[in-house]
Amino acid sequence: MNAGVVGIGRYLPNKVVTNFDLEKVMDTSDEWIRTRTGIEERRIAPDEIDTSDMAFEAAKNAIKNAGISAEEIDLILVATVTPDRPFPSISCMLQEKLGAKKAAAMDISAACAGFMYGIVTAKQFIETNVFKYILVVGVEKLSKVTDWNDRNTAVLFGDGAGAAIIGPVSGNRGILSFELGADGTGGKHLYQDEFIIMNGREVFKFAVRQMGESCIHVLEKAGLSKEEVDFFIPHQANIRIMEASRQRLEVPEEKMSKTVNKYGNTSSASIPISLVEELEAGKIKDDDVIVMVGFGGGLTWGAIAIRWGK
Ligand code: UT7
């Protein structure tokens, strides 16, 4: 039996902060941000909306979209590096808020690759027939760990949440292959003390190399050719990084998800937010082959190839 995505949902805060808004408070320009990153605006959550609140909204939408009840969820996995507090985990907070009484719950810390780690973990429990429905959420309130005096990082990030219900799917649909990896020697290039500290150039080089390679690896593992890829959803960090991996995969521009312009880098939430956006726009159909890939602090990476549909 294959595990696949049987429901999706997302949540984005209402407040839009444009590059022009940032120009007024720091030494930067719309021109620099757009040409170096592709970002035009991002969403920022107000003080009264914390990470767990955004996770709850996205999770509710995914449960509804899957047509199941919260009581049917066996496990909750929340990928985040910006929890409300160190513990209890966001997943335990969600378990209560959703009334998912029988669900086990834990958070995953794999930065921007967290949602991929969550999906792949969920797949194992479903394909071994241990669990039936698993809620995987990618959620970040990066604005609370952003140094608004550091233009190197402040212009990049945004807040938001995306969620998926992973469950059994029919026929040859579902997750076809995956790759997960980590390189702790690169941890020094992207980490949080009080705020996010980043060596942008090093992370850029790593991302371009690793995203491209992981995409090729999941295709090889699934026995697919590049031509068989119908849609590509890379982690939305920087349009130049995304373009480099798109070219490696040789998928045309219109087949790559691009939401970084509207939401900036939302870390673990970027892939599920994009997935919802593309489904709503009708760009993904049943039986399409989709490649998703993420990379992030750790350093971590993860990719999957999935044949869409229940
Ligand atoms: O999810 C994973 C998280 N991280 C990433 O994905 C980040 C990966 N890295 C990147 O996306 C890029 O490295 C950045 C967008 C962060 C930076 O782009 P870059 O082309 O690597 O620029 P750079 O760091 O080489 O900086 C070029 C110049 C510098 O000025 P000097 O030293 O050449 O005079 C910076 O001080 O741009 C300057 N700069 C800015 N200027 C205006 C850096 N940030 C800004 C800014 N506005 N916000």
Image (spheres, rainbow, N blue to C red):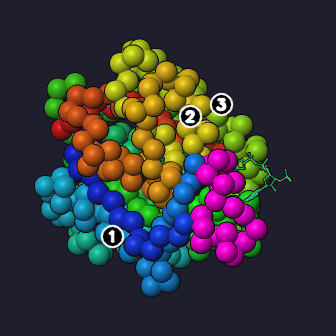
- Of label 2 and label 1, which has the lower sequence position? 1
- Name the residue: 27% across, 29% down: 288
What's the CA distance linking mark 2 and mark 1? 32 Å
What range of the chain is rendered magenta? 19-37
Res. 309 in view: yes
What's the CA distance linking mark 2 and mark 3? 12 Å
Q: Nearer the viewer, residue 148 or 21?
A: 21
- Of label 2 and label 3, which has the lower sequence position? 3
31 in the magenta segment: yes
The amino acid type of the residue labelled 1 equals: Phe
Between label 2 and label 1, give the one nearer the viewer: 2
- State the residue position of label 1: 56
From the image, give the main secondary structure of the stretch colored magenta: helix
- State the residue position of label 3: 209
How dense is the environment of label 1, judged by Cα within 10 Å: few (below 14), some, or many (20 and up)? many
* Quadrant location, the C terminus: top left
**Spot occupied by residue 289 in the image (x, y as percentages of width and height):** 32, 27
Element at label 2: helix
Between label 1 and label 3, give the one nearer the viewer: 3
- State the residue position of label 2: 243
Res. 141 in view: no
- Name the residue: 13% across, 55% down: 67
Element at label 1: helix
Residue contact at pointers 2 and 1, CB within 8 angstroms: no
**Spot occupied by residue 230 in the image (x, y as percentages of width and height):** 34, 27
**Spot occupied by residue 170 in the image (x, y as percentages of width and height):** 16, 32
**Spot occupied by residue 152 in the image (x, y as percentages of width and height):** 74, 60
Residue contact at pointers 1 and 3, CB within 8 angstroms: no
What's the CA distance linking mark 1 and mark 3? 34 Å
Element at label 3: helix
The amino acid type of the residue labelled 2 equals: Glu
